[in-house]
Amino acid sequence: MKASRLTSVLNDLMSQPWAVFIWGAPGIGKSSIVRQIAEAKNLPVLDLRASLLDPTDLRGIPMIQNKTSVWCPPSFLPKTSDKPGILFLDEINAAPPLVQAALYQLILDRRVGEYVLPDGWKIIAAGNRREDKAVTFRLSSALANRFIHLTLDVDADDWHDWAIGHGIDPRVTAFLRARPENLSRTPDGVNPAFATPRSWEMASDVLGQFQSPEAASDILPGILGEGVSTEFLTFVKNSVILRELQSLLTRPDKAPVPKELDRLWVLVSYLTSRAADESVQKAAAVLINRLPADFAVVVAKDIIKCAPLFARTPAFLDFVRAHKECFL
């Protein structure tokens, strides 16, 4: 399921006692969704990387007390004095079988050794699939049977909605609008870098630190992989340059509107990324009547996500009436 649907389902399950397992490829946002839910509910998150644990890390170490051995639980696990939160067991199927066995008791009985997980703590686990070429161990059937299993899939439209509100570089969103198949790629086993939603966010941050994509041309292949980074840099080079964008903003009624698809996508993404700016909204009110209909609809829908008051402008209302079939 796509990220927005998974978030909704997890929210519904937060008040239930069942443990949840989120499956998905590396870098597509599993842990980010858990953190976003916790932040929205003002809950702490204890993120345990199961692949880095030893069985004794969970059980603790024994000590002699009144001639009897007693297990001293680790200090990093939630305490009864802590407020309720989320115990996030990431990379659980990358943990060796002995660690999985310790986690089995924690998930099944909410205890391990002398330790008891306090009431109110929600257990959520996550892991990669074998087809993702990640390091995994087989999850025992007994442990797997203790979870509700949900699979997170990459959805380009869903990711774009997220990107609008998170400051992703408009050249990145434009490229992925035009080439959505490049949002997530399966690693080839040779190049350690490959495209994922997480690596595109990193690429966006890198672009923000350099004056031009060409200046980052030696870095982007190490984030996105050789093939995707080359395609992205070619796209940016052939798309709308800043001077053309400025002309369209200052003279939206007269400046030439690009005809090439790549350049149109960059224009759309640029308008959307700056939708909160009143001058951009004024330009968009004119441009939606000059752009090809498909692109104009995308601009209109994306802008009202960032600037809801734009939906009340006469230009937008006239546009919706003229294209009402696209807004049903």
Image (cartoon, rainbow, N blue to C red):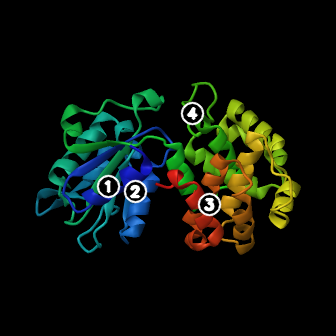
Query: In the figure, is residue 322 to the left or right of 74?
Result: right
Sequence-wise, the earlier of marks 4 and 2 is: 2
Q: Which mark is residue 10?
A: 1
Looking at the rendered image, the disc whose residue lies closer to the viewer, 3 or 2, is 3
Looking at the rendered image, the disc whose residue lies closer to the viewer, 3 or 4, is 3
Query: In the figure, is residue 160 to the left or right of 204?
Result: left
The answer to whether residue 155 is visible is yes
The number of numbered discs placed on residues in the rendered structure image is 4
Secondary structure under tag 1 reads helix
Sequence-wise, the earlier of marks 3 and 1 is: 1
The answer to whether residue 206 is visible is no
Report the quarter where the N terminus lies: top left
In the rendered image of this protein, does residue 117 appear above or below residue 222? below
Secondary structure under tag 3 reads helix
Distance between the alpha carbons at the discs numbered 3 and 1: 37 Å
Q: Which residue is mark 4?
A: 185
Looking at the rendered image, the disc whose residue lies closer to the viewer, 4 or 2, is 4
**Which amino acid lies under the numbered mark 2 shown in the image of this protein?**
Val
Distance between the alpha carbons at the discs numbered 2 and 1: 8 Å
In the rendered image of this protein, does residue 41 appear above or below residue 218? below
In the rendered structure, are the residues bearing label 3 and label 2 in contact, judged by CB atoms less than 8 Å apart?
no
Q: In x, y percent, where is residue 22?
A: 35, 45
Q: Which mark is residue 34?
A: 2
**Which amino acid lies under the numbered mark 3 shown in the image of this protein?**
Phe
Sequence-wise, the earlier of marks 3 and 4 is: 4
**Which amino acid lies under the numbered mark 1 shown in the image of this protein?**
Leu
Q: In x, y percent, where is residue 155?
A: 49, 43
Q: Which residue is mark 3?
A: 319
**Which amino acid lies under the numbered mark 4 shown in the image of this protein?**
Arg
